[in-house]
Image (cartoon, grey):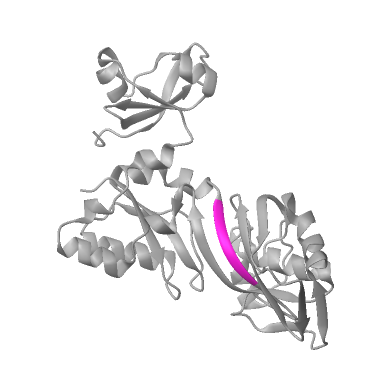
């Protein structure tokens, strides 16, 4: 059995569940999980967790992401991307300067409010929004706050002119951000309907495109019995936490998940990764009711 992170480059047309199914089939193991869905129309970095690493899938899901999106000004759709039916179209001749575009983008950086699109997987009263949308049932969508760390305009033009304007942006953001909703917001700030024409995820947590393999490449590695050559250690996904190498006297106690006297690093920095020979054995945090003790949050007994 493999234990680690397999960063896959998800191709357009596949769901995240499709990727998991194919990885299971290629490497011949069941304990495989993805780290947050990517729409079928989106390509990019999709870290896949194998074996013990499935225990930290939520940490990768909650970590920051980076995307490159193409924004199209002049038309908006039901889904806010290029797949949906047109809702509004503006065929007037448009002229937008670089300064106007940067002014439209600036207020969208930081903590902002977003209302998820109707065609999304957000649940309302136990039902997905896209299910309401398909049935034509109106429902109030919950507004939520998301974090946009950076939006970089990747087009160096000074002026955009035409009936339809397109430009690429790079977005660094937190969990739960809808990039297509961001594209619509940029259009609204300019006074036009807009949608997201295409999207590529270039980073998920610490994993980037350069770390990824395609499913075809993975098949080749599997046939050559070289899957471990492209498997990254689960420690890579824990790099935001402090690491403490264990004294030999604590090996068995930590391995057994015992509640222990509070470690200095845990007291000062919170959740801490305890290692043996650099390999993560457990994650500990302050005990919720006994502040002089620490207890395990996650255990990795087969990671050694």
Q: Nearer the viewer, residue 219 or 114?
A: 219
Nearer to me, 278 or 154: 154
Figure quadrant of residue 180: bottom right
User: How far from the left and from the top, in percent, is residue 226?
Assistant: 18, 56
Image quarter for residue 169?
bottom right
Q: In this view, does 217 lie above or below 173?
A: below
Residue at 42% across, 22% down: 295
Numbered marks: total:
0
| Residue drawn where x is 34% and y is 19% of the image | 258
Tell whether position 74 is magenta: no
Main SS of the magenta part reads: strand
Position above or below: 207 against 156: above
Q: Give me the residue at 82% from left, 79% from top.
A: 95
Left or right, residue 131 beside residue 208: right
Residue 191 is situated, as x and y percent measured from the top left of the image, at 84, 73
Q: Can residue 120 be seen in this view?
A: no
Q: Viewer-proximal residue, 132 or 109?
A: 109
Segment tinted magenta in the rendering? 65-70
Q: Position of residue 233 (x, y in %)?
A: 32, 43
Where does residue 2 sit, x and y in percent of width and height? Answer: 23, 48
- At a point 82% along the width and 82% down the height, the residue shown is 94
The answer to whether one can see residue 284 in this image is yes
Q: Is residue 263 left or right of residue 97?
A: left
Residue 69 is a magenta residue: yes
Is the C terminus in the top left, top right, bottom left or bottom right quadrant? Answer: top left
């Amino acid at each position: 059995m493999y234990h680690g992170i397999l960063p896959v480059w998800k191709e357009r047309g596949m769901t995240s569940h499709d990727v998991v199914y194919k990885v299971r089939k290629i490497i011949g193991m069941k304990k495989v999980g993805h780290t947050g869905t990517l729409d079928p129309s989106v390509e990019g970095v999709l870290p896949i967790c194998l074996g013990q690493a499935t225990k930290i899938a939520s940490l990768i899901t909650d970590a920051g992401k980076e995307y490159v999106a193409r924004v199209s000004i002049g038309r908006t759709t039901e889904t806010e991307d290029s797949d949906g039916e047109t809702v509004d179209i503006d065929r007037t001749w448009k002229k937008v300067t670089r300064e106007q575009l940067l002014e439209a983008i600036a207020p969208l950086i930081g903590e902002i409010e977003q209302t998820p699109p109707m065609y999304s997987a957000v649940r309302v009263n136990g039902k997905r929004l896209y299910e309401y949308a398909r049935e034509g049932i109106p429902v109030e969508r919950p507004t939520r706050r998301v974090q946009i760390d950076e939006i970089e305009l990747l087009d160096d033009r000074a002026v955009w002119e035409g009936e339809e304007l397109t430009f690429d942006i790079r977005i660094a953001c937190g969990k739960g951000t809808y990039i297509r909703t961001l594209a619509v917001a940029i259009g609204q700030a300019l006074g036009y309907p807009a949608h997201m024409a295409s999207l590529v995820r270039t980073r998920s947590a610490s994993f980037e495109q350069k770390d990824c393999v395609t499913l075809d490449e993975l098949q080749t590695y599997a046939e050559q019995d070289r899957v471990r050559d492209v498997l990254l250690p689960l420690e890579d996904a824990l790099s935001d936490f402090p690491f403490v190498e264990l004294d030999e006297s604590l090996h068995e106690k930590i391995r057994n998940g015992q509640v222990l006297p509070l470690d200095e690093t845990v007291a000062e920095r919170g959740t801490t990764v305890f290692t043996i020979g650099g390999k993560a054995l457990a994650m500990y945090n302050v005990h919720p009711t006994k502040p002089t003790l620490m207890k395990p949050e996650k255990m990795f007994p087969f990671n050694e």
